[in-house]
Amino acid sequence: MRNSLSKTFYLLFLPFIIVAFSFEPSTKEINLIDAIKVKLISAKTISNGAYNVESVDISIQNNTASPLRIKIPSETLFNPADNGEQTLILLEDDFITLKAHDSFEGHVSAYCTEASDRCPTKGTPMKMTMNQDKNLIAMIHYLKGKTINESSFQDAVWAISDGHSISNIESFTKEDKAFRKYLAALTKQEDTWYTSPRSVRIDNNGNFNYETVNISGRIDFECEKGASVRQDIYKASGEAIFVSEKYMTVQSGKVTYKFRLSVKGWEKGDYYIRVHDGTNDIVKYSLKV
């Protein structure tokens, strides 16, 4: 008898639980720009004086009595009020969840798309629009679901938006290398044998100054086993920059070694590495500083 009563109570109680939970408000997901248009939220975006990573300050107010999940979609552009300053782009979707009538203040990571313009001034209002550059769209779609080192994002954007060299992008993993190869094809550039990361300095007027810091890569060549070889460095004009007095004795007919050269302070231009046996050239590798 007790078992029958317990079963009846359970059957009566279960619908009550289902009904009770059905009244919980669900969190609505909506695009940030659309949410602003229909006044579900109020939002403000301003520059914090940076040109990449957490470069945009954002504040949002939920104007509704329901929780909201705000999506800031990749491809969103942040346009500064001053046209002489850089427009920034969001490369990955960002999400902000707000309770009813709640507010949020934080940052979003956006990257410069106009290397020749000035760095955005701190406190400058930024208007949101959507990017129309097909190559930037293609790159953003490529990034989805992949683990690419974020330190390469800014140079990747500049390779598309400003024609900067693919060689500036450092490759740490197989995915990074595949990404750089993809960008080379997208921008119709050579995927150089070397990597040449740069230091970026912003002057007091917000203008950008770039300097190549070092060049690294892999040197491959074939020669006779036991041969003595050395490497020199020249300007494209033929002017010697570095002439080595040290020889390397080749242990095998096929040689591979890691090359690294500090070029900080070097004059910008074309150079080449000459690997030779003292008389005859074995291989030459071109590079740009």
Image: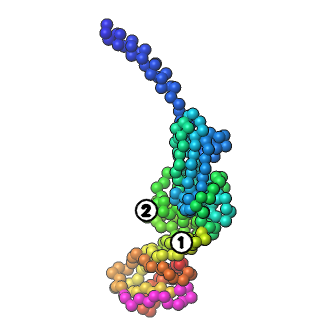
Residue located 54% across and 69% down the image: 166
70 to 46, vertically: above or below: above
Q: Distance between the residues labelled 1 and 2?
A: 27 Å
> x and y percent of residue 21 in the render?
48, 26
Can see residue 278?
yes
Residue 201: mark in rendering: 1
Name which quarter of the figure residue 35 lies in.
Answer: top right
Q: Of helix, strand and loop, which one carries label 2? A: loop
Residue occupying the point 53% across, 30% down: 25
Residue that numbered label 2 is attached to = 173
Nearer-the-camera pick, 169 or 10: 10
Q: Taken as a whole, is the magenta stretch helix, strand or loop?
A: loop
Q: Where residue 91 appears, x then y in whole percent?
A: 56, 55
Extreme residue toward the bottom, this view: 279
Position in image of residue 122 (x %, y %): 58, 61
As shown in the figure, which amino acid type bears the numbered disc 1? Answer: Arg
- Residue 185 is at least partly visible in this image: no
Above-or-below relation of 228 to 288: below
Circles 1 and 2, Cβ within 8 Å, touching? The answer is no
